[in-house]
Image (cartoon, grey):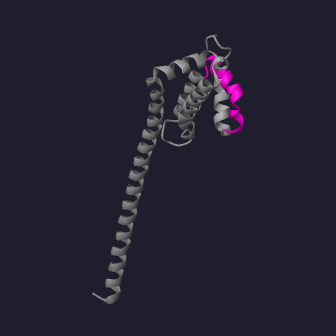
Amino acid sequence: MTLSQIANIADLITALVVMVSVVFVAIELREGTRQAKRANTQQVIAGIRALKDWGKDPALAEVITRGRQSYDSLDDAEKFCFANFMEESLTAYDSFLLHRDSNLFRKGESERAGIGAFRQFMAHPGAIQWWQSAGMDTRWPSHLVAAVERAIAENGPIGTPR
């Protein structure tokens, strides 16, 4: 075997090693992406589960219930609690809107879930009063404001079926 033939074999082996390395990197990237998607999904779910803690305190649950009926009838401390509840609720479900362009959920499912949740939260007269007085449109991201406004519009007048 000549030195040229040995060099050709070495080049072939090098090429095979590079190809195997590229395949390995591709498999690792795919697995890393899969794990990141799982972690993102769990983070979204954890944020939504945290909302349920608001209902564990009967006094706070009562403020939220009254606030849904009439935000304007709450005193300042109660308005503060209700406003925090509404902000946390809407921002928790905003995660669905942030993921709508990813392939974390099936196409359309993420936005449908987010807007559906916003419709639920904004289906109360007090929630509308809070939204109109809170000035969220000047301090929240425009995509979130648009989604809440869409949900309010889709609900129609309070008390009418959709």
Which residues fall within the magenta stretch? 122-139
Residue at 59% x, 24% y is 78
Q: Is residue 127 magenta?
A: yes
On the picture, is 40 further left or further right than 146? left
Quadrant where the N terminus lies? bottom left
Residue situated in front as seen by the camera: 157 or 72: 72
On the picture, is 123 further left or further right than 44? right
Expressed as whole percent of the image width and height from the top left, the position of residue 147 reads 64, 31
Residue at 65% x, 14% y is 158
Q: Is residue 136 above or below residue 16?
A: above
Residue at 45% x, 24% y is 57
Residue situated in front as seen by the camera: 148 or 106: 148
Secondary structure mostly seen in magenta is: helix
Expressed as whole percent of the image width and height from the top left, the position of residue 127 reads 63, 22
Quadrant where the C terminus lies? top right
Q: Is residue 141 above or below residue 114?
A: below
Residue situated in front as seen by the camera: 34 or 21: 34
Q: Residue furthest bottom?
A: 3
Residue at 71% x, 26% y is 132
Expressed as whole percent of the image width and height from the top left, the position of residue 25 reads 40, 61
Query: Quadrant location of residue 7?
Result: bottom left
Expressed as whole percent of the image width and height from the top left, the position of residue 17 reads 35, 70
Q: Is residue 12 magenta?
A: no
Q: How many marks?
A: 0
Query: Quadrant location of residue 14?
Result: bottom left
Q: Residue furthest left?
A: 1
